[in-house]
Amino acid sequence: MTRLSTSTLASLCVLTLTLGVAWAAEHAPNKPAETAPAMRQGMPGMMEHPPMDDMAKKRASGWKAIMHAVAVLTPTEGSTVHGVVHFDQEKDSLRIVAEIQGLTPNQKHGFHIHEFGDLTSTDGSCAGGHYNPQDQPHGMPDAPQHHAGDLGNLQADDQGKAHLELTVTDLTVAGRINPILGRGLVIHAQPDDGSQPTGNAGARLAVGVIGIAHQTMDKPAEKPTDNSTPRK
Ligand SMILES: [Cu+2]
């Protein structure tokens, strides 16, 4: 009886093992796909990001697709300085073109992107400090170290007008590197002398907000198509 039981038990063990191996072999191809996510979730330090929904994808690509920005600068209290600045995203750089009026004739005026596109104060102070996302010291735009928002100076002619064209590689309209949309733009009363902490450029004469533009500065806005029948 004892020998029979042992024999039966041994047979059952062999049968179970055989069936187990056969089952495992049959199901093996499906196993990795089923267990992999669970394994990843269980590993310390690993995070599963939820898949982006279509709206999130549209939003992400929408911001990256913005290539042109514009700032209209208006005078602060007691100033007459005003103008328009265009920003065009190129492949690896940002082209900046400024047309400004009302400046002190034949003088340089400090010109910076500031932290905030907030024009609520009449003296431009709500624009905050220089846009400096990389925590650099102040400097001219061609210096090895400078605030990303340091655009140097505008040089006024004898009519108080300034035209500036500048190409920089450490700013983008809305890309990964120091995006400028929504930031403030400031023209100062004095030249930016490059000194710390902010170039000693004095009062703020004009401020603007950098907003989304719908086309490049080289293509003037077309008039909206008017399909209505002209009156006779
Ligand atoms: Cu400034």
Image: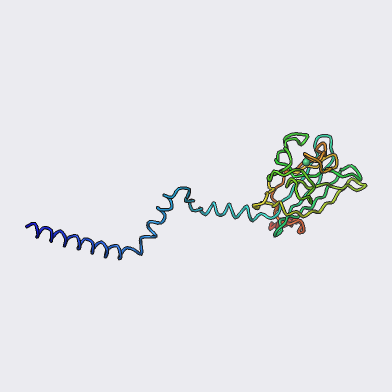
Residue at 25 percent across and 61 percent down: it is 20
Q: Residue furthest front?
A: 3
Name the quadrant containing residue 190: top right
Instruction: Please state, as top left, top right, bottom left or bottom right, where the N terminus lies in the image.
Output: bottom left
Residue at 21 percent across and 60 percent down: it is 16
Q: Please give left or right for residue 7 compared with residue 92 in the image.
A: left
In this rendering, is residue 219 above or below 150? below
In this rendering, is residue 79 above or below 100? above
Q: Nearer the viewer, residue 79 or 129?
A: 129
Instruction: Please state, as top left, top right, bottom left or bottom right, where the C terminus lies in the image.
Output: bottom right
Q: Nearer the viewer, residue 93 or 102?
A: 93
Across and down, in percent, residue 175 comes to 65, 53
The colour mode here is rainbow
Q: Residue furthest right?
A: 158
Across and down, in percent, residue 104 comes to 89, 42
Image quadrant, ligand 1: top right
Name the quadrant containing residue 227: bottom right
Name the quadrant containing residue 124: top right
Across and down, in percent, residue 226 comes to 70, 56
Residue at 9 percent across and 59 percent down: it is 3
